[in-house]
Amino acid sequence: MTVAEAVGRVLADLGADHVFGVVGSGNFHVTNALVAAGARYVAARHEGGAATMADAYARTGGGLGVLSVHQGCGLTNAMTGIAEAAKSGTPLLVLAGEATSPRSNFAVDQCALAAAVGAVPLRVRAASAHRDAAHAVRLARENRAVLLNLPLDVQGEPATDVLPPAPPAPPAPPPDVAQLAALLAAARRPVFVAGRGARHAGPALAALGARCGALLATSAVAHGLFRDDPWSLGISGGFATPLAAELIAAADLVVAWGCALTGWTTRHGTLIGPDARVAQVDVDPAAIGGHRPVDGGVVGDVRAVAEALADVVEPAPGYRSAEVAARIAGAGRWRDVPFADESDGRRIDPRALSVRLDDLLPARRVVGVDSGNFMGYPSAYLSVPDERGFCFTQAFQSVGLGLATTIGAALARPDHLPVAALGDGGALMGVAELETVVRLGLPMVVVVYNDAAYGAEVHHFGPAGHPLDAVRFPDTDFAALGRGFGCAGLTVRRAEDLAGLADWLAGPRDRPLVVDAKVTGRRGAWWLEEAFRGH
């Protein structure tokens, strides 16, 4: 068995069931080895798209994301997606051929590239190929992005080692919850904010919240975790409803569960009252207090900590009163908040568009969202069935990842309708992957919130009188672009035009649908002013 064959076999044996990539000479053999061992290969049209697909597949399916790229330029093309995965703590394993001659056109310092964006660089050797591959998988499963370099002159050599059995995992020590239990016992208005690290612990957190009377919220990436709980406030941070912002800011205890409490989740700290106490639970000791001081921290698995607390915390009403319940029932969702519809017949208000989309799209959906001024509308107005129904690749704040995000999420959840929500700028950046959507036969709805501009920059710089020629563009006909790739196309200027979406949903869904929604651009999204405080 060659080194390339050994790496492919080990990865497949350890659970790599999908591999995303663009194949060149340097990753041809390892990709074929993965396929021969049982993995499905998903060909993207650009390595950046492939990286994001692998990231989203891992986030949505809960497994290992695997990316396969050519040496040099294949890796550099993928770097934005790898940076996003590294910043998000996604278990992503990148396989890259590596040029070993300094005179090769493909020669770059691939280890330095990986380290620069927060990924862990490794290199396979013939004498330890099986062990090197298994080590790379173990590191990636610790919620890291890992680059396994495959030197070109090593891949064809015999893999001479044998993979030893994995040692048993040491038992986890019981978490010390006494300090957090005391904080909960003293709280009268506790709020839980669950993040990425709590997505596996929804029932345990809901049960603990019921016991101590906590209201429940999530960061954006954990949207949907408390979908059916009547005490859920939805997303905390810039996308929070006015009611959620009010109730979180009035909390006397905020507990972050697998959540970093970044400026995005706390509105740069303004959602945490000046007298509120703050606690944090995370498996990573470095995360405790990483963004703001805390009054109590517990290092441990969120679910284990929540279950341990449920055994020692006395029942209390906490924040849960009949008045609060009534307010959440009446104004707990953005679509319950009245707004003046600014649709004018030529362009549709993005709020009106999003409400109507939420009504029409089936409940079993998986929503991927790109970056830009528009992104709060699908994130806040489109409901999702659970925490795996929403994929938000925003840790690096890159525009253009949304379509690839939704492809990866769709493959992880084939029983849900995939919905890609894009701005016009991001849609054009990632448009090549429409061919991938068609080729894979995904019944995807691609909604382009099209204001013919980089809307965030328009609303950031426009009020100060700066020229905006660099961030405004001629209108693009995305419905026609979609038809060119083999999709159905629909142009929406009024709510009534969405009848075409209803017809597509009622039909065979035998090809994707691109919805070119010509949205109003008179004002920036409500979350934008808050967001730009961090710039």
Image: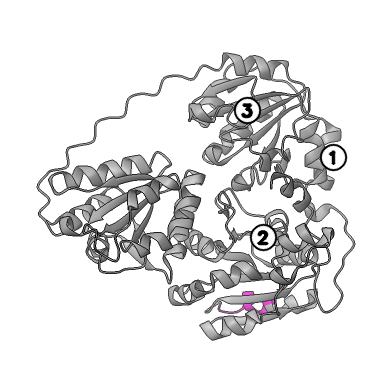
**Residue 185 spot, x, y in % from top left:** 69, 16
Q: Is residue 217 above or below residue 45?
A: above
**Residue 295 spot, x, y in % from top left:** 65, 19
Q: Earlier in the sequence, mark 3 or mark 1?
A: 3
Identity of the residue drawn at 65% across and 41% down: 218
Task: Please give the count of numbered marks on the rendered protein.
Answer: 3
Q: Which residue is mark 1?
A: 326
Q: Quadrant of residue 296?
A: top right
- Please state which amino acid type lies under the numbered disc 1: Ala
**Residue 348 spot, x, y in % from top left:** 80, 72
C-alpha gap between disc 1 and disc 2: 34 Å
C-alpha gap between disc 3 and disc 1: 21 Å
Q: Which residue is mark 2?
A: 372
- Please state which amino acid type lies under the numbered disc 3: Leu
Question: In the displayed structure, does residue 297 sit left or right of residue 530?
Answer: left
Residue at disc 2, secondary structure: loop
Viewer-side label of 2, 3: 2
- Please state which amino acid type lies under the numbered disc 2: Gly
Identity of the residue drawn at 70% across and 41% down: 236
Residue at disc 1, secondary structure: helix
How packed mark 3 is, by other alpha carbons closer than 10 Å (few <14, some 14-19, many 20 or more), is many
